[in-house]
Image (cartoon, coloured by chain):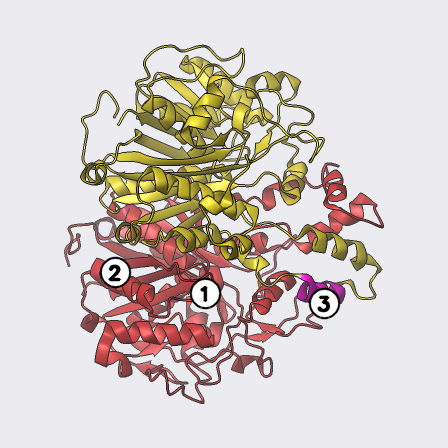
Amino acid sequence: MSPDRMPSDRDPLITGIGLITCLGEGEEAHLAALDSFVPIVDVTTFAPYPVHPMTALALDTQIPKRGDQRQMEPWQRIGVYAAGLALDQAKVKGDTALLERMDMIVAAGGGERDYAVDAAILAAMPKADDPDVYLNEHLLSDLRPTLFLAQLSNLLAGNISIVHGVIGSSRTFMGEEASGADALRIACARIQAGQSEICLAGGSFNAQRPDTFLHHAMGHALRRGGHAPVWARQAEGGGAILGSVGCFLVIESRAHALARGVIPKACIAGIETDRCGRAPGEAAASAARQAAALGNASAVISGASGAARATAEEREFLDRLGLPVRAVASAIGHSLEPSFPAAVALAAMSIARRKLFPPLEPAEAPFEGQLAGLLVTSWGMWRGEATALVTPA
Amino acid sequence: MPDTDHLGRPTVAITGTGIITSLGQGQQKNWRALTAGVSGIHRITRFPVAGMRTTIAGTIDFIPVADPSAPAFAQRLAELVVAEALAESGVDRPGDFPGPLFMALPPVEIEWPQRSALAAASSVNDGLSYTDLIRAAESGHFEPWYERFLFGSVGEALATRFGTKGSPIATSTACASGGTAIQLGVEAIRRGECEAALVVGTDASVNPESLIRFSLLSALSTRNDPPSSAARPFSKDRDGFVMAEGAGALVLESLAHARARGAAILGILEGCGEAADGFHRTRSSPDGKPIVSCMQRALADAGLSPDAIGYVNAHGTGTPENDRMEYVGIAAVFGERVSSLPVSSNKSMIGHTLTAAGVVEAIFTLYTIRNGLLPPTINYDIPDPALPVDCVPNSARAAKVSHAISNSFGFGGQNVCIVVGAEPS
């Protein structure tokens, strides 16, 4: 709760956090890793681009059927796994009656290519008598029929329904960082308005994909070389370091959480999302409006991607705000769709223990005080600005 | 009719619609063709179809698009239908829509023409790999494609052009996406977040790979000749759906707001229902429970009993599985009325507009009510005795309908139903 607001039955509380990143799995692992931060980066697989790789997952613990595992590509497995962790912590897992009325909003990109098939077709097409016909024939004969289902954006949600039984409703949002922010915003707005009692919201991102690097290489917004934290990186031209992330939150009304007797981690006191054309100063003005609408906080969890222009403008905005800042992409990388849910998750973990983790680089100020509230920012690499206020439950 | 509904929420009015399908552009052209039983399905000419099992679709070939790609087409169609809907509604000053944008969009990815260009730019002849493509992508000539193939690009373009407020939301719930987008708009108005919402469903993704992907799942009709005969919902010899393109836009507005500005109210968006299905990635629960729940939830949301519904705009894809399960669901919800309740499928004529279908068909449902004319299910030559529905076979029929339900079901266990009602008398 924000200190200046009275608790309400309709407050959206976080009662389950499922987070998997390069730092590990779950709350304890993340807080421990952030308390004594050491970067975990793979600089060779996609050189010259570094990437924060997904921690090793014991898939059987969350996706027991091998058949289900086989039907998914990594981005879906990451998401289904993280969703399972969130359901576990919220004590919802296996409660069929509750799962049947549980809502779900997933932020998703698209699925993975068959890289070998693509490369073989691209190599042979120009030499074929009729390249278009060659393409038809080889897509027909070489694509796995079920690959489509591992690619469709809404099939992360579909797999969560199948594996974990969340079937009250299922919505998938697309649109990079903004989709993750809007997934949480709509989940909270529905709960506050009485349109929903409990919702699983979040997303997943597999950074360790050649097609992802192909897309982002066209935009020239990625960091090359080794790891450097988000703010320090800017002196060297900036750029995002992508990270594989799965993050889901169980969000429910205070009344619903109380009735179930679960211990909430934190309250999402407010979320603001917007867009602008990114003329100089526009995003900062938008972020300033959002922060003003949300109220006071002790510190900021910044979702800054590292992408040069947006990150420089956010830095100036945060300096004016004057609060201690932690840019969590330094530790878990930038993950587009789930980047905002993951930043909110780390904020909620910090709020739950009333203590902020130490600076991740010299540019960040220490904060030893009692946390009353954390602002969470997300500026998309290209578009979209979002801010949340996370407070004690 | 009061400004609030049976639960005290703001009543949601429809004040503008815009539509493009393979039947043509605009309300009049579409409605005339749809009620004349005209098919928009034809042989694909956009790309060579040699070697394909399915060679037909409802592509939209009459709208030129520069630097074509699925998102570029989808965006262009959306621009046109939104312009039509806004002109009808009169709710906005140009470029300043007074509310949020909710879109049903197909997933986006780099396509074969782009991949081929990158491969050519790599100058690698043998042993080409993604590493080579990435090196080529870095060269700097491909930056426009970075933005074009971001998932947020269509929404950004529409939000800029029409001046919608806030963060545009693009939803994908497969073939139920349009229904989800409508539901998001209805909920936002009911929460009091806005007085108006712009809802768009758009899909123009008929390209070789998407056609082949659906073909590999055995979802498509292979009855290529004549193309107009391929989509046969509820017929015994139905053999799959026909991919198609289309777009629809709806201006949703609180009834109070629409009345205050003296707007013509076209109809009421009375209710929405959704239910997910955890049975299988492409098949429905054999008991039809999620489909039944979905329709029941939509009716409850609208505050109506099944008896109040005079017409069902079916999902009606023409796949053996969908039509059977949809019949099971309708029979469970409507009981004995299942044999007399008109249930027709627009897809028999326009094909399956996929992501856009939920919006396109909600709009046709509205026109059905407004015109008192039920669009037919064409190609209904051999009734399936297992599905004894009144599918309004082969020719349109006059009927007074006050409330109708539009169904949308999709891969991944997605189900959304929308209830549309007549304008207040």
> Which residue corresponds to the image point at 21% horizontal and 61% vertical from the top-left?
B300
> Which residue corresponds to the image point at 52% horizontal and 28% vertical from the top-left?
A23
Q: Which residues are magenta?
A: A132-142
Drawing shade for chain A = yellow
The quarter of the picture where residue A247 lies is top left
Task: Provide the major secondary structure of the magenta segment.
Answer: helix
Q: Amino acid at mark 1?
A: Gly
Asked whether B377 or B38 is in front, the reply is: B377
CA–CA distance in space, label 2 to label 3: 45 Å
Q: Amino acid at mark 3?
A: Glu
Asked whether B7 or B240 is in front, the reply is: B240
> Which residue corresponds to the image point at 31% horizontal and 39% vertical from the top-left?
A90
Looking at the rendered structure, the secondary structure element under dot 1 is loop
Mark 2 vs mark 1: tell me if same chain: yes
Q: Is residue A158 left or right of residue B338?
A: right
Judging from the image, mark 3 belongs to the subunit labelled A
Mark 2 vs mark 3: tell me if same chain: no
Judging from the image, mark 1 belongs to the subunit labelled B
Q: Position of residue A172 (x, y in %)?
A: 43, 49
- Which residue matches tag 3? A137
Mark 2 or mark 1, earlier in chain? 1
Q: Amino acid at mark 2?
A: Arg
Q: Is residue A214 left or right of residue B150?
A: right
- Which residue matches tag 1? B26
- Which residue matches tag 2? B297
Vertical position of residue B226 compared to residue B266: above or below = below
Drawing shade for chain B = red
